[in-house]
Amino acid sequence: MIIGFDFHPRTRIVFGVNAVDRLGELAREVGAGKVLIVTDAGIVAAGHVERAKHALEATGLRVAVFDRVHENPTTRDVDECVQVARAEKIDTLIGLGGGSSLDTAKGCNFLLTNGGRMQDYWGVGKARKPMLPFIAVPTTAGTGSECQSAALIADEVTHQKMACLDPKAAAQIAVLDPTLTASQPRRVTACTGLDAIAHAVETVVTRKRNELSLLYSQEALRLTVNNLERVLDCPDDLEARAAMQWGAALAGMAIELSMLGAAHAAANPLTAHFGIVHGQAVGMMLPHVVCFNAEDRDARAGYRHAARYAGLREGSVEALVGRLQSLLQIAGMPPSLADCGVTSEVIPMLAAEAAAQWTATFNPRAMTAADFERLYWAALHP
C-alpha cells in the first residue's frame, strides 16, 4: 500500500563540531537585532550560555537571557518567559538547552506574537499571526524538538500536557553541535537517549507513517540504538555524541510526519503523577507497547524492519524487545514501575489518562483504557 504525505521542510540544519560558534552570523541571517536566549540554570552553569552570548555579541547583536526554564515546562514557565521578552523588546528567540528550553521558547513565541494563553493553542494550526524568528540549539540528544513544530507545555494547574502545533512555531534554523552535549550528566544522556530511541521505534509503526518518515526512522534507529551504549561507556566520544544528536534530530523529523504512539501516551501520566523523567518513563513502557502492538500483523512487520535497521541480525520482534530491555539495564533504569513508586491502586487512573492522550490515537492498534491497564500491569512487575 502506498501512503501519501505532504512535507514542507521548514528548518535549516547546521550540524558540526563547534557549530554554535556560528550563532551570531546565523541570527543575523534571520534578521535578529536583539535576541532572547531561553535556557535553564544548568546550561548557564555549564558555560553554554556564555559561549552563545559571545558568538552573538561578536556580530553586534544585543542579548537578553531567560534562564528559569524547568523540566517539563508549564504555562507558568511560558508566562514568565513572555514577561522578560516583552520587557526586553526582543525580535528573535533562541532556545538553548534540552526539549524543555526549546518548548518554552516556542510557547513564548506563540503568546508574544499572537496573545492569549497557551491553552488557546492546544491543537494544530491555531496561531493566526506570524511569529518571530526562532533558532533552536539543543544541548541534549533526545527530544528532536529542534526539528518539530510543536510546543509541549503542561497546564500549571491540571498538569495536563498540551501539544501546541503550528508550522509557524518551527525553528528557522537548528544548530546541532555535539560539543554541547558533552557536559550532560550520565543520567541525562541516558534518559534523553532512550527518548530518542522510543521516537525512532514508535514512528516506524504509527498510523501516519509514510515513505518519507520511515527513511528518517530507519536512520535514527541505526544511529541511536548503536551509539547509546557507546556514549554512556565513553562520555568523551564525540563521534558517538554526534551520532546520537543527529539520530535524535532525524527521529524528530519522523515525528513531524508520523506522530507517536502508546508508549508516549503511557509515559505522560507517569511523569505527571510520579515525577518519572520522561525519557525513563517512555523507555520503560516501550518494550511492553512493542509486545502489545506486535499482535497486529502490520505492526509486527514494522518492528521486524526496525530490528534490522537497528542492526539486530535476527530481525525479529523478540530481538528488538530484548535489545530495548538491555539498553534500559545499561542506562541504569529501575526494572519495574513498582521500583518507581507506582502502585496497583493507581493503574485505573493512569490508564484513563493515557487513553485520553493525543498520541494514543496514532498507535497502530486502537487503544482503550483497559488496554493501557494491561500495559501498566505488565510494567509494574515485569
Image: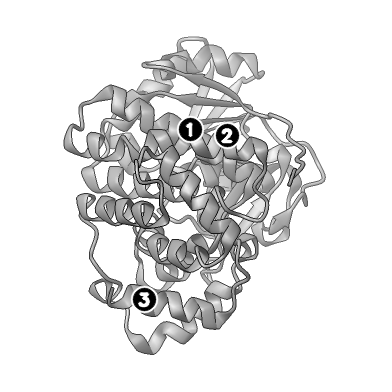
| Residue 251 in sight from this viewpoint | yes
Q: Quadrant of the C terminus?
A: bottom left
Query: Residue 229 appears at what percent x and percent y?
Result: 24, 40
Q: Nearer the viewer, residue 138 or 107?
A: 138
- The secondary element bearing badge 3 is classed as helix
* Residue 96 showing in the rendered view: no
| Residue density around tag 1, few if under 14, some if 14–19, many if 20 or more, within 10 Å | some
Q: Is the residue 239 above or below the residue 215 in the image?
A: above
**Residues packed near mark 2 inside 10 Å, few (<14), some (14 to 19) or many (20 plus):** some
Residue at mark 1 to residue at mark 2: CA–CA distance: 7 Å
The image quadrant of residue 120 is: bottom right
Residue at image mark 1: 219
Q: Depth check: 28 or 257 in front?
A: 257
In the displayed structure image, the side of residue 92 where residue 58 appears, left or right = left
The residue to which callout 2 is attached is 215
Give the residue at mark 3. Answer: 378
**Crowdedness near tag 3: few (<14), some (14–19) or many (≥20) residues, C-alpha within 10 Å:** some
